[in-house]
Amino acid sequence: LKDKKENEYRLLMLTSFAIHKNTTIINKIIPILNSYETNMNFKFILTIDNYSYEKFFSDEAKKHCINLGRIHPEDCPQLYRESDVLFSPTLIESFTANYPEAMVMKRPILTSNLPFATSICKDAALYFNPIDPNDIVDKIIEIANNRLLYKELVEKGSERVKVFGTAQSRAELYLKTIKLIINLN
């Protein structure tokens, strides 16, 4: 990423382009954000393919986006470090690694107030209605201006991520489950 300007606030949207990811809501968010009197320059950090970016994002939105295109998994930690929050307006997920990754990387989570997100994040995220750009903007402004809330969400995320276990503990649980199933047959 380019050097971060002093008044820049980065919202990381670590995802590929798909309709259910709701990335194009940024086209509706930007004009509302621009109408606010704030000294912050909000930048959405995207990782979608360039074709979708060029086709589906307005010129106004592009002024407030940095699209990196597809990235390698090993580059993700640096993106979290260079961003202020994880932003995920997704409409449906079976599970996303973004939530626990943000928790581990000590970044607060702004995401959809839908059961898949609330069941994973619990009180470690700030939620919004993913189809209401005004609600989304309100939450972006809230997290950007409230350092206490920011810190609180990071702390809750650090605690919440502990319930997911390690890769090794999950693999052991899978093996144990498979053995149980084999022994039942």
Image: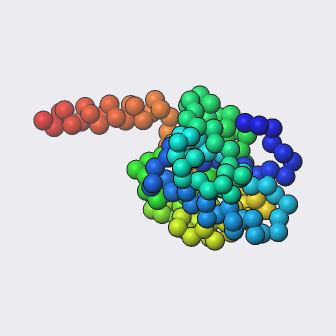
Residue at position x 76%, y 59% in the image: 144
- Residue 58 at what x, y percent from top left? 62, 56
Residue at position x 37%, y 35% in the image: 173
Front residue (pair 182, 151) = 151
- Residue 29 at what x, y percent from top left? 64, 63
Front residue (pair 176, 105) = 105
Front residue (pair 16, 170) = 16
Q: Is residue 27 left or right of residue 31?
A: left
Quarter of the N terminus within the rendering:
top right
Q: Is residue 21 left or right of residue 81?
A: left
Residue at position x 25%, y 31% in the image: 179
Display coloring: rainbow
Q: Is residue 79 visible?
A: yes
Numbered-mark total = 0
Q: Is residue 77 above or below residue 100?
A: above
- Residue 143 at what x, y percent from top left? 72, 60
- Residue 9 at what x, y percent from top left? 76, 52
Residue at position x 63%, y 71% in the image: 134
Quarter of the C terminus within the rendering:
top left
What is the residue that sits farthest to the left in this orientation? Answer: 185
Q: Is residue 166 above or below residue 113?
A: above
Q: Is residue 11 visible?
A: no
